[in-house]
């Protein structure tokens, strides 16, 4: 840093030394004419050669641009001889038009005038670009648009491709979208302007590929702006698919797709035959053809596009997976077909003979179509492509198409399963995800499951977890499949013990989904024997737990299964039900007394009843009108306790219950603080006694931040309530300061700040104010004209009384409140072996955590490391460290670097996750329009972090470096 | 008419000793110079006497291009350049140049040292030959001489395999060598731009095959290896040293990495190590994945694959061994096979085709008992390990066959044709019967001519090259000044000018300039014509009657009645004369220059019709 600063200093220094002569006159002139544009103008006049002028312009463009600088620039334009300078000026005008508070219309005439004299093609192109900017700045003005379009028409026949390009772009962005109507009101409109479409389509056959591309893009732009493209273009677009240039082909693919979406059902003839097909099928075939294009850009585009053509007929769709094999002119079956047949015949996959893929029947040579016409094998090619971008696009397209067609899903299964073996992890992962998405439509065969399960040994955690996720949603067909899956999962467990949770969860779903398939396996799984007692398995063995999770979840919907359990199984059940309640469901166990009770509470109706209970508790609270009421505190206390317990019992309502409990605790704190004796004491005496009240105020503030930022699903109403509590807390703080501090000076600024906050609250929640009538703020606002005028002393008095008199503000719960939570899975904090490293160097600590209901974790979640000496570091994880395995769920897998000076013995450090917040984030979202006002920054400054999730202790030991 | 001639000396309706002569635009090029694996006599090399009976080849060939390092494409190179005699440039890509001499040396060793042949090329000859090689880069246009240029495209078949475009003027030929349209674990797919050559010479090894997806095969392979290793068995994979071996290595290496496997993988050493070194170097020639990740780790720096030592074969526990040669007919792979054959836990995977008569072929056909009657094999065994020479061997281990081949299948060939859009197609490097099928297909689906010449048979293709002509700017500007519609690139337009053919270049210039350049005087060419006319008036009257007549007919032309008794229409002169005998028979003299031919002939026909009667005589 120091070196850098030093460099900076030298840099500036040397600048001053080198250019004193040049700088001096410029400075003088600026003194006389402060306007920057004028200075520029003078600079330009002074410039003896184009290079100088260009330098001035570049310098000008780099600094922030003012609106008034235009005249000088435009004036110079006419005089300038050099093309490059004129070009720069033209681009500057465009830049100016983009700046705020500038009316582009004012320079429109000037810019249009320049067209009359301009000879250079490059400059013309740049001028057209500027016009485009102006046009997009003034979208409403029809007249301006027509004038601009007129210019574009005039220059469409230019010989330079850049000019034609820009003209087409202009037409695409500004061309008439409505049906061409020659209104009398706009005499400016020449008749030609109406039909931008046919005009643009003329340029589909331009000699320059760049212009062709621009023409197609312009057409697509028109389409995006709502113009209905005519079907006649279809043939032209199809011809462009065979263009020599890849960008043209790529754009043409888009064009064909757009047309296929516009006219899916119209009929087109197949050339060289009398047959006809639907347009969407025809275009599907054509785009499929592009999947084997020479350029990978086009291939990606084509593969992506295929995924968006859902209206295609199933016949065509299935062809994309079809590839007729042959060997020496004899028909061969694909490996997929062979596998299927083997499976159907009941024989276990042999495939161990040479030439078991020997071709069978002879192929009729005339019938073999080598260039697959139409859609044949498009995906087979796409999935085998050299570039992984194409493969991913193909996988995505498969997924989209399979989700809309069950039969296609069945067919593409084999291909997706094959992709699990891709060389690039991203592709493997994507195909696993895709398979999960379509797994509702399919049932895996045993041989397919076998392939899928082979991936469980993958060393990449992402892959394994994605696969677990997939298995959660998979349907399998036989009990062998279940056995196979269990076996592989247990293998996975022994190989990668860290996958424990994920594997258990996977087995839970597997059991739930296939109770009847698990049933015949139970004796074997639990190793029970009809006559002999078998040894009791180790309860801590993760593999045994895994088996139990599978069995118990299956038993949930298969009541006969429990009869097969042995005694210790029941004991283990009760233990697991308690320790791993999220994995083990409640079972109806015959002859067990506690069983019915347990299942009674947690039956299906329990959520509603809990909801009801929550509502009742809250309505009971609402009977409190004033916090000073006797018994109010007790009621609050009890309700808080109830809510907390409810949150523990009912995970669905945990968020809502916690939220309300925290809110009520704030109120309770306020009440307690206000009932302190100190209020009745004389001011000088209370100096020492207000510790409790101060702490309460502080805690309230903290709690409000938690309320606001830790919970998601809040509506404006709740945010207002929270802010209200915060105001109360601040008022309390203010009153307390007033009582403890001597003198008025410090108070003045504090009061001012408070008033500002009240004001901003009013602005922020105008809509909510009616609901806050009786509350603290409501009362305060009634007095507001008086407030701003009165002295700090009076203000304090008013606040004190209002605080005491204000009513209790009821909390209305929104539909869904979720509390953000985080669990650190790794490090577990159980290790007794310290992490040893040389002091002064760094050691990387792997952190694996799951986050739930955290919005935008990339910016908010941070890792804090607390050293025993009180030092703490906050580390911001990289955006790439976050993965999102499901909705509202995130996974943080990152490394934090630890370092410290040498310790004499190993000690524990604490690692925890923080949720960073800043109130400015919210304020901006609420009123973004008034962001220019001066009040904003002061208010937005409240930033901080909320610790969430349990901290984990890690044993570390920095050793002194050996010399 | 200009024509391109293609004559295969080898690989015409045949696989092996690829060698194709092309003459295009007066240049002779030899594509590949390979040997035939199936012969041990003279037929092994192409018949160079086709080119010339005696003497060196240098003056008959402009250049030699080698597509890749397989011996059936480069095996005869030292023989041709050093023993027959050729001193011109030999073009090949960098990897081919690096690996080719290794293979040639190996080939030489086997033939000379083991088989004891004499009159074969020596190591020094290989070195001398390689000195004549000019390396090529992908997509780099190399000027062989002023007119002949060549350009290499990626072919994907093995490391450094290239397709070559040969171009003279606007005529061009593309030779594919061997290529592969489906990417594999270490190489990408062949690619060519839409270069529209006059002839595309393509290999057609798999002309009648459409292959299954590569993924199934890979998955099967990995699954089999995985299962065997898990069972504690040993896996033997006999391979040829280069090409597929590297692909399988990468496949297993990544699989081991992914699945976190611990069993050792060995590679029997030999020339492989040297070759592997080149694979590491020529990363740009590999596929996307290897190219993108080599910064972190070069995929050819194998972590799990170690060099094999003979003693390892007896180690307990699972292992995977790659051993040469591929057909199990001799050497290390056979030794290991003998050791492992008795255990049913073990497995052998044959990744390629086996020639009849080899042990590989036998076990693939399910033979369970092997009689070692093959003398050569027995010698081999005795030489290596005298102890284990049984005469019969029971095969208990599992035998698998996996086809990993890197040639384009029928669909791939069609795809390449679609990419390049050739005007004619020529098939080589394949069996005649199979070619026939593909030929029909190509002609049917692309409606282009397809040829499949046999060795020594010449195919001639007539081309229609466009001839570029330089046009002088002045002439163009003059043409522009004449007005008319703006130039439309799709419509031809006629213009006057003089075509000068000089020093092998064509130029179109204005006639004046041409005259000046050639130092010629301009000659005026005038047509004169007499038209007889019956007219009772006097000569001057007739003339003025003609004048008025023409004035009324030819509107928009300048017509002058000159005082010297002539009428000028533009530059056409009309005079009237009559003989004294027949004053009524007027003879009109018309004279016009060559440039006004149109108008002149029009006038003559007009005047022949006579003058209308109602004309006033002024």
Image (tube, rainbow, N blue to C red):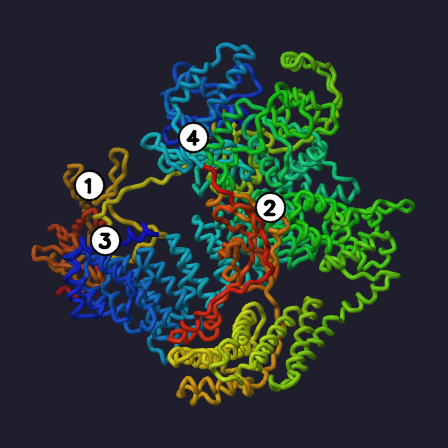
Upstream in the sequence, badge 1 or badge 4?
4
The spot of residue A653 in percent (x, y) is 67, 70
Labels 3 and 1 share a subunit: yes
Residue that carries the numbered disc 4 in the rendered image: B94
Q: Chain of mark 4?
A: B
Q: Which residue is painted at 67% across and 13% down in the image?
A: B378
Name the residue furthest front.
A685
Labels 2 and 4 share a subunit: no
The secondary structure type at the circle numbered 1 is: helix
The secondary structure type at the circle numbered 3 is: helix
Residue that carries the numbered disc 2 in the rendered image: A460
Looking at the picture, tell me which residue is in the foreground, A206 or B295.
Answer: B295
Closer mark to the observer between disc 3 and disc 1: 1
Asked if disc 1 and disc 2 are in contact, CB closer than 8 Å, the reply is: no
Looking at the image, can residue A772 be seen? yes
Q: Is residue A815 above or below residue B249?
A: below
Closer mark to the observer between disc 4 and disc 3: 4
Name the residue furthest left.
B563
Q: CA distance from mark 1 to mark 2?
A: 77 Å
Closer mark to the observer between disc 2 and disc 4: 2
Q: Is residue B132 above or below residue B439?
A: above
Dot 3: few (<14), some (14–19), or many (≥20) neighbours within 10 Å? some
Dot 2: few (<14), some (14–19), or many (≥20) neighbours within 10 Å? some
């Amino acid at each position: 840093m120091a070196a850098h600063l030093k460099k900076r200093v030298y840099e500036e220094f040397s600048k001053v030394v080198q250019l004193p002569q040049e700088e001096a006159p410029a400075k003088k002139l600026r003194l006389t004419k402060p306007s920057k544009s004028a200075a520029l103008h003078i600079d330009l006049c002074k410039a003896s050669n184009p290079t100088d002028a260009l330098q001035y312009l570049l310098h000008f463009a780099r600094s922030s641009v003012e609106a008034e600088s235009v005249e000088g620039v435009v004036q110079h334009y006419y005089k300038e001889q050099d093309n490059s300078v004129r070009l720069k000026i033209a681009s500057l005008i465009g830049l100016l038009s983009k700046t705020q508070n500038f009316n582009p219309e004012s320079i429109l005439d000037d810019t249009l005038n320049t067209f009359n004299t301009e000879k250079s093609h490059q400059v013309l192109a740049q001028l057209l670009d500027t016009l485009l900017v102006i046009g997009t700045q003034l979208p409403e003005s029809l007249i301006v648009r027509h004038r601009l379009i007129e210019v574009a028409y005039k220059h469409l026949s230019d010989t330079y491709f850049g000019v034609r390009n820009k003209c087409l772009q202009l037409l695409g962005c500004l061309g008439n979208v409505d049906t061409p109507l020659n209104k009398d009101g706009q005499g400016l409109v020449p008749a030609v302007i109406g039909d931008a479409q046919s005009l643009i389509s003329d340029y589909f056959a331009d000699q320059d590929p760049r212009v062709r591309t621009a023409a197609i893009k312009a057409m697509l732009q028109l389409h995006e702006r709502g113009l209905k493209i005519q079907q006649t273009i279809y043939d032209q677009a199809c011809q462009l698919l065979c263009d020599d240039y890849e960008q043209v082909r790529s754009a043409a693919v888009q064009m064909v797709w757009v047309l296929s979406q516009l006219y899916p059902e119209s009929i087109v003839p197949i050339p060289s035959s009398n047959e006809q097909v639907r347009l969407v099928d025809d275009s599907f075939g054509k785009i499929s053809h592009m999947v084997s294009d020479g350029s990978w850009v086009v291939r990606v585009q084509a593969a992506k596009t295929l995924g968006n053509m859902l209206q295609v007929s199933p016949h065509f769709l299935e062809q994309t997976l079809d590839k007729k094999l042959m060997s020496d002119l004899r028909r061969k079956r694909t490996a997929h077909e062979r596998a299927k047949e083997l499976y159907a015949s009941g024989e276990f996959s042999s495939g161990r003979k040479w030439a078991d893929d020997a071709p069978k029947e002879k192929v009729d040579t005339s019938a073999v179509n080598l260039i697959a016409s139409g859609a044949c094998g498009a995906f087979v090619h796409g999935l085998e492509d050299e570039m992984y971008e194409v493969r991913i696009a193909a996988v995505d397209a498969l997924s989209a198409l399979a989700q809309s067609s069950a039969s296609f899903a069945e067919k593409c299964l084999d291909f997706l399963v094959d992709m699990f073996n891709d060389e690039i992890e991203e592709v493997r992962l994507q195909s696993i995800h895709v398979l999960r998405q379509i797994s509702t439509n399919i049932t895996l065969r045993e041989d397919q499951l076998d392939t899928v399960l082979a991936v469980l040994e993958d060393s990449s955690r992402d892959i394994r977890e994605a696969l677990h996720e997939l298995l959660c949603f998979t349907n399998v067909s036989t009990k062998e499949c279940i056995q196979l899956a269990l076996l592989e999962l247990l293998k996975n467990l022994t190989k990668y013990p860290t996958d424990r949770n994920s594997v258990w969860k996977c087995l839970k779903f597997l059991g739930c989904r296939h109770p009847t398939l698990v049933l015949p396996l139970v004796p074997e799984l639990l190793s029970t024997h009809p006559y002999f007692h078998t040894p009791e398995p180790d309860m801590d063995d993760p593999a045994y737990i895994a088996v139990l999770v599978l069995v118990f979840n299956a038993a949930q919907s298969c009541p006969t299964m429990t009869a097969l359990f042995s005694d210790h199984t029941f004991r283990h059940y009760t233990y697991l039900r308690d320790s791993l309640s999220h994995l083990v469901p409640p079972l109806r166990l015959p002859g067990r007394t506690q069983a019915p009770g347990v299942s009674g509470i947690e039956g299906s109706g329990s959520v509603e009843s809990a909801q009801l209970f929550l509502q009742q508790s809250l309505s009971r609270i609402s009977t409190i009108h004033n916090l000073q009421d006797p018994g109010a505190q007790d009621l609050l206390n009890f309700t808080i306790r109830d809510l907390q317990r409810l949150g523990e019992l009912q995970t669905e309502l945990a968020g809502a219950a916690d939220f309300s409990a925290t809110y009520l605790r704030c109120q309770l704190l306020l009440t307690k603080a206000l009932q302190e004796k100190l209020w009745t004491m004389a001011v000088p005496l209370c100096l020492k006694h207000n510790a409790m009240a101060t702490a309460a105020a502080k805690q309230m503030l903290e709690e409000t931040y938690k309320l606001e930022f830790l919970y998601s699903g809040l509506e404006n109403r709740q945010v207002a309530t929270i802010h209200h509590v915060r105001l109360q807390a601040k008022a309390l703080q203010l009153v307390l300061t007033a009582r403890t501090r001597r003198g008025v000076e410090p108070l003045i600024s504090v009061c001012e700040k408070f008033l500002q906050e009240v004001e901003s609250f009013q602005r922020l929640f105008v809509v909510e104010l009616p609901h806050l009538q009786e509350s603290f703020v409501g009362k305060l606002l009634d007095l507001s004209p008086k407030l701003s005028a009165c002295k700090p002393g009076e203000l304090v008095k008013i606040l004190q009384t209002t605080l005491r008199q204000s009513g209790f503000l009821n909390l209305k719960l929104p539909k869904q409140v979720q509390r953000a939570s985080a669990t650190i899975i790794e490090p577990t904090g159980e290790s007794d072996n310290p992490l040893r490293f040389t002091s002064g160097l760094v050691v990387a600590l792997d952190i694996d955590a799951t986050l739930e209901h955290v919005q935008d974790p990339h910016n908010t979640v941070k890792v804090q490391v607390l050293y025993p000496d009180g030092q703490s570091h906050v580390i911001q994880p990289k955006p790439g460290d976050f993965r999102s395995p499901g909705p509202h769920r995130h996974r943080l897998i990152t490394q934090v670097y630890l370092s410290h000076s040498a310790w004499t013995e190993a000690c524990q450090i604490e690692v925890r996750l923080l949720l960073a917040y800043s109130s400015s984030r919210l304020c901006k979202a609420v009123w973004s329009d008034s962001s220019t006002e001066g009040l904003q920054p002061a208010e937005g400054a409240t930033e901080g972090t909320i610790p969430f999730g349990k901290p984990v202790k890690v044993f570390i030991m920095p050793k002194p470096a050996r010399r | 008419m200009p024509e391109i001639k293609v004559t295969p000396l080898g690989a015409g309706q045949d696989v092996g000793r690829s060698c194709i002569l092309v003459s295009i635009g007066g240049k002779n090029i030899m594509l590949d110079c390979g040997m035939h694996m199936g012969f041990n006599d003279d037929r092994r090399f192409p018949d160079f006497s086709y080119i010339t009976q005696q003497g060196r080849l240098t003056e008959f060939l402009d250049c030699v291009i080698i597509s890749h390092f397989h011996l059936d494409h480069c095996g005869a190179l030292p023989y041709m350049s050093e023993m027959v005699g050729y001193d011109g440039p030999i073009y090949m890509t960098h990897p081919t140049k690096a690996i080719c001499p290794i293979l040639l040396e190996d080939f030489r060793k086997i033939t000379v040292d083991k088989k004891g042949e004499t009159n074969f090329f020596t190591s020094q000859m290989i070195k001398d030959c390689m000195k004549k090689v000019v390396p090529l880069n992908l997509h780099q246009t190399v000027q062989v001489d002023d007119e002949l240029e060549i350009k290499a495209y990626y072919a994907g078949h093995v490391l450094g395999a290239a397709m070559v475009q040969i171009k003279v003027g606007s005529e061009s030929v593309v030779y594919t060598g061997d290529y592969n349209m489906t990417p594999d674990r270490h190489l990408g797919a062949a690619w060519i731009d839409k270069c529209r050559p006059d002839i595309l010479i393509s290999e057609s090894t798999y002309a009648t095959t459409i292959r299954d997806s590569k993924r199934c095969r890979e998955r099967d392979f990995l699954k089999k290896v995985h299962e065997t290793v898990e069972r504690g068995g040993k896996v033997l994979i006999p391979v040829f040293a280069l090409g597929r071996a590297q692909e399988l290595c990468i496949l297993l290496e990544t699989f081991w990495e992914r699945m976190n496997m611990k069993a050792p993988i060995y590679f029997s050493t030999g020339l492989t190590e040297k070759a592997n070194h080149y694979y590491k170097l020529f990363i740009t020639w590999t596929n996307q994945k290897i190219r993108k990740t080599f910064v972190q780790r070069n995929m050819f720096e194998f972590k799990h694959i170690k060099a094999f030592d003979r003693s390892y074969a007896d180690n307990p526990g699972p292992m995977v061994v790659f051993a040469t040669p591929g057909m199990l007919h001799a050497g290390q792979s056979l030794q290991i096979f003998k050791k492992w054959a008795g255990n049913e836990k073990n497995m052998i995977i044959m990744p390629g085709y086996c020639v009849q008569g080899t042990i590989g072929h036998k076990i693939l056909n399910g033979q369970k008992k092997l009689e070692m009657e093959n003398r050569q094999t027995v010698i081999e065994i005795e030489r290596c390990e005298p102890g284990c020479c049984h005469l019969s061997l029971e095969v208990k281990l599992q035998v698998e066959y996996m086809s990993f081949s890197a040639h384009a299948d029928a669909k791939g060939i069609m795809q390449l044709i679609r990419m390049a859009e050739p005007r004619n197609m020529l098939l080589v490097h394949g069996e005649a019967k199979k070619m026939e099928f593909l030929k029909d297909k190509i002609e049917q689906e692309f409606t282009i001519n397809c040829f499949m010449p046999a060795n020594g048979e010449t195919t001639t293709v007539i081309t229609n090259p466009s001839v570029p002509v330089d046009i002088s700017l002045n002439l163009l500007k003059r043409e522009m000044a004449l007005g008319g519609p703006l130039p439309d690139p799709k419509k031809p337009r006629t213009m006057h000018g003089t075509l000068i053919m000089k020093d092998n270049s064509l130029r179109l210039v204005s006639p004046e300039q041409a005259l000046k350049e050639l130092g010629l005087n301009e000659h005026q060419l005038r047509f004169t014509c007499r038209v007889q006319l019956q007219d009772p008036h006097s000569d001057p009257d007739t003339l003025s009657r003609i004048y008025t007549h023409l004035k009324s007919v030819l509107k928009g032309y300048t017509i002058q009645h000159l005082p010297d008794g002539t009428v000028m229409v533009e530059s056409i002169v009309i005079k009237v004369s009559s003989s004294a005998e027949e004053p009524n028979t007027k003879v009109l003299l018309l004279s016009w220059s060559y440039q006004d031919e149109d108008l002149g002939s029009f006038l003559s026909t007009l005047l022949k019709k006579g003058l209308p009667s109602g004309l006033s005589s002024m």
